[in-house]
Amino acid sequence: MVQKEAKKPRGRPRAYDPAQALAGAQETFWRQGYSATSLDDLSEATGMNRPSLYAAFGDKRALYLAAMDDYVAAAQHAMGETLSSDAPLEQALLQVCDLALGLYFPAQGGARGCFLIGTSLAEAMNDDEVREKLHAALTGFDDAFEARFKRARKQGEIAANTKPAVLAKLASAIIHTLALRSRTGDTRASLRATAVAGIKMICAAS
């Protein structure tokens, strides 16, 4: 009896790592902005030709939205883990700012600011989906801060009559300041000093 040769799977295996390709696209959008990033830029960043890019991610806009979702998910996860620790309130808030500054001032290359704020504000003016994603992301950050302030109030770290939702917006405002000013020339050291001062004011007034 002659055994049949096992059939080989059809098609070529993927020659790229989807997560790595998305990271390359995200970095390119981050550095150049959405409008200034071309498909050729994305092909170079991902190591994929245009047909492969379209097959894997869709068009440029779809790839940008995927990069946006990936950034927000990673940021919210890191923020949630930091704020859920047993660290004192002031220390936990500063740790969140340090996480942000680490993203805005990478070890390699110059300051790049925040991916979300730096790339989506202009696009949100004319793209409903980008605007909705941006709003949801910022609201999610507010919610994470608010949950930490509620815990702080329950544990007696802040006064019982303070309003966690208001404090959360103030904490978010510090992050927004770091995001904007990191891209306009302020140094990391000066921005960290700003964060320290802002956090102390929030904690002292609550």
Image (spheres, rainbow, N blue to C red):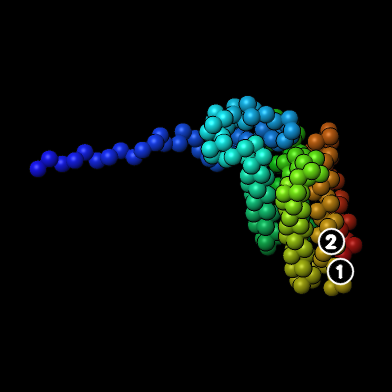
The residue identified by callout 1 is 162
Left or right position of 126 against 2: right
Q: Quadrant of residue 146?
A: bottom right
Say which amino acid is labelled 1. Thr
Q: Position of residue 2 (x, y in %)?
A: 12, 40
**Residue 138 seen in the current view:** no
Q: Is residue 76 above or below residue 205?
A: above
Q: Quadrant of residue 59?
A: top right
- Position of 76 with respect to 113 (left or right) is left
Q: Is residue 191 above or below residue 153?
A: above
Helix, strand or loop at label 1? It is: loop
- Expressed as whole percent of the image width and height from the top left, the position of residue 44 reads 59, 27
Residue identified by numbered label 2 = 167
Q: Could you tell me if the residues under marks 2 and 1 are in contact, i.e. CB atoms within 8 Å?
A: yes
| Nearer to the camera, 189 or 97 | 97
Where does the image place residue 182, in percent across and percent down from the top left? 80, 38
